[in-house]
Amino acid sequence: MSEKIMVVDDDPSIVRLIQYFLERERYEIIIAGNGLQALKKAETEKPDLIMLDLMLPGVDGFEVCHRLRANPTTEDMPILMLSAKGDDTDKNEATKVGASAYLTKPFTGPVLIEQIRELLNQKAEAK
């Protein structure tokens, strides 16, 4: 069985690009277009990793991350925060709310896959 990765982004072109990279690596993909969908799907689908865009309609990525960490069902899921915002303030805030890692857009497929593998390996070692 392949690992499940939830992609949370409201930009269809970014979702398609990430989906392309992940499908090539045989990951199972769950897509959420906004923060509230992400919170619901994280509980029901129980992904192995969440890729979370920072700028989302309604509930932003910081708040989604904070709520995921506060929920016993989702508190241990690795969260890879994605954002076009690369300044230290946003990276520090992401760490503060519980993001496992932060990746600045645009990124390459190999960099994305390497980051995902690293987070999934850390999760496996923590068990």
Image: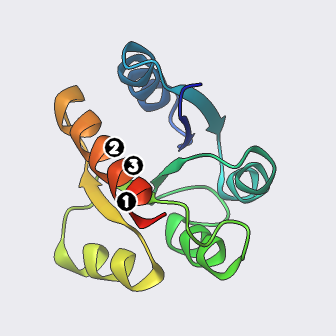
Mark 3, residues whose alpha carbon is within 10 Å: few (<14), some, or many (≥20)?
A: some
Residue 17, located in which quarter of the rendered image?
top left
The single residue placed furthest to the bottom in the displayed view is 96
Front-lying residue, 9 or 70: 70
Mark 2, residues whose alpha carbon is within 10 Å: few (<14), some, or many (≥20)?
A: many
Question: On residue 9, which mark appears?
Answer: none
Mark 1, residues whose alpha carbon is within 10 Å: few (<14), some, or many (≥20)?
A: few
The N terminus - image quarter: top right
Percent of width and height locating residue 34: 66, 50
* Mark toward the start of the polypeptide (1 vs 2): 2
For label 1, the residue is: 125
Q: Amino acid at mark 3?
A: Leu
Tell whether 107 sits left or right of 63. left
Percent of width and height locating residue 98: 45, 77
Q: How far separated are the C-alphas under marks 3 and 2?
A: 6 Å
For label 2, the residue is: 116
For label 3, the residue is: 120
Q: Are marks 3 and 2 in contact (CB under 8 Å)?
A: yes
* Disc 2, SS: helix
Camera-near label (3 vs 2) is: 3
Q: Amino acid at mark 2?
A: Ile
* Disc 3, SS: helix
Q: Residue at x 58, y 29 (%)?
A: 29
Camera-near label (3 vs 1) is: 1
